[in-house]
Image (tube, rainbow, N blue to C red):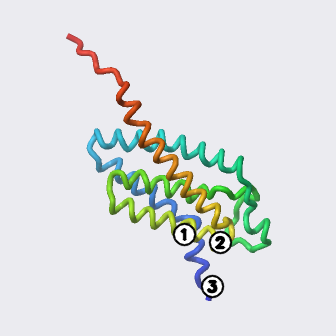
Amino acid sequence: MLEAMHPFIIFGAKYLVVLPILVVAYLLISLKASKRTELLLLLIVGGIFALLSSKLGSHFYSDPRPFVSDHAVPLLTSAHDNGFPSDHTLLSAFLAFVVLAFSRKLGAVLLLAALLIGTARVAAHVHHGVDVVGGFAGAALAFALAYALIPLLRSHEKPAIDAE
């Protein structure tokens, strides 16, 4: 029975991460210029925080991947490194939080997709549940920091100079 699920697990673990990327690309094309700027700022500033949370998380917490520590047979190839946090989950959850700031419906769909991605990575034996939780936590923290910091940065912008 579980073997019949392997193609779905592999698809979710490996390829479903493309969905949030496509939705962000769609938003970049469809939003008005001012909202597009806000989206880009959230992606850049939050992306930096997401990378930092991933690096810091893996530095302070070590969780060998299931195929290393539990001798489970993985359904896809993965590095034999620290599995914490799940980078696929962190990326997809971060993009979901960003999209949620612009569209509740699309953001909710992407949060569900991030949960499916994390679940599939656990089912594929390349992550433990704690790695997925760490990915969500890092994404939420990165988004929250960026969301709070961007208005502060923008309030310090100098007004445009009129050339007369």
Q: Name the residue tied to disc 3.
A: 2
x, y percentage for residue 164? 20, 10
Viewer-proximal residue, 52 or 24?
Answer: 52
Amino acid identity at mark 2: Ala
Q: Is residue 38 left or right of residue 11?
A: left
Q: Residue at x 67, y 68 (%)?
A: 76
Q: Is residue 126 left or right of residue 107?
A: right
Amino acid identity at mark 3: Leu
Amino acid identity at mark 1: Gly
Q: Of the residues under marks 3 and 2, which one precedes in the sequence?
A: 3
Q: Of the residues under marks 2 and 1, which one precedes in the sequence?
A: 1
45 to 18, vertically: above or below: above
x, y percentage for residue 26? 35, 54
CA gap, disc 3 and disc 1 = 15 Å
Q: Name the residue tied to disc 1.
A: 12
Q: Residue at x 45, y 44 (%)?
A: 43
Q: Residue at x 33, y 59 (%)?
A: 104
Mark number, residue 124: 2
12 to 52, vertically: above or below: below
